[in-house]
Image (cartoon, rainbow, N blue to C red):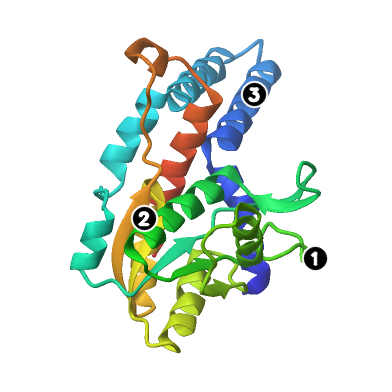
Amino acid sequence: MDTLLALKPILTALVLPATSGLLALFALLFWAWRNRLRVAGLPVALAGAATLLMWLLSCQAVAIWLSVHLLPQVRPIGPEDLKIQQVQAIVVLGGGVENDAVEYDGPTLSPDAMSRLLYGVHLSRTTQLPLAYTGGIGWAGQTEQTSEAEVAALVLSRLGSTALRWQEKLSRDTRENALLTAALLKNDGITHIALVTHAWHMPRSVRQFEAAGLRVVPAPMGYIRSDVGPLLQWLPSGNGLRESGWVIKEWLGLLVI
């Protein structure tokens, strides 16, 4: 089973638009070249359709539309809401590590993980609730690298900020995040948490943490949105393709859990 799960990063990359779209274009153009004297019109037409689809998936307007229509919507929440609902702890879900950040001469969190951590710190400071971080070494990581939870603790020490009460260091994916964090928190009598992750990642994460036996109040951040004008939202960008990929990945994940 672990061998199969270790293939998750590769299989995910093959499914998402950046890789699957380019592979489809390559295959169709190769087909057109092989059949250039016979039925080249069909593969060329399909290649054109694939190009149009890649264009659309690279537009932020499409990414926003997909996030609204494919994923359950989660409303933002504030510190007062957490107090009213008597949350016991805040759990930040890991989002990746840069293992060899030359500017720090060592590891640091990825931008996505950093934004989650900063929002978790904000909630912790304003509510005085203890803070947990869950993240080990993902399936795509190197075995010798530092766990993400340890890197998060290092980042907070660099900032002179709120310390982590709990560090879950062994998980490799969201399911293990939930199971191992639940076991860690229940040892201290914690069963009711606020979960911090990106809004597009929240529906699947809540399912996993509730399945692990925790009561979960979603504390989403990082919504898929845009500050640029409508016309620019319809021009392809790397950010648009990345966000469309996030939504498609989470939508597929919700179908299989």
Q: Give the SS element for disc 3.
A: helix
Q: Give the SS element for disc 2.
A: helix
Residue type highlighted by circle 2:
Met
Crowding at dot 2, Cα within 10 Å, few <14 / some 14-19 / many 20+, comes out as many
Q: Quadrant of the C terminus?
A: bottom left
Task: Tell which of 76 and 66 is nearer to you.
Answer: 76
Label 3 – label 1 distance at C-alpha: 43 Å
Residue 248 percent location from the top left of the image:
43, 43
Viewed as shown, does residue 75 lie left or right of 256?
A: left
Label 3 – label 2 distance at C-alpha: 41 Å
Residue 173 percent location from the top left of the image:
55, 64
Viewed as shown, does residue 218 lie left or right of 156?
A: left
Residue identifier under label 3: 31
Mark 3 vs mark 1, foreground winner is: 1
Vertical placement of residue 165 versus 25, above or below: below
**What residue is rendered at 43% in x and 79% in y?**
182
Residue identifier under label 2: 202
Residue identifier under label 1: 144
Residue farthest to the left, as pictured: 84
Vertical placement of residue 119 versus 154, above or below: above
Residue 27 percent location from the top left of the image:
64, 29
Q: Which mark is residue 35?
A: none
Q: Quadrant of residue 135?
A: bottom right
Looking at the image, tell me whether mark 3 or mark 2 is earlier in sequence order.
Answer: 3
Q: Is residue 129 visible?
A: yes
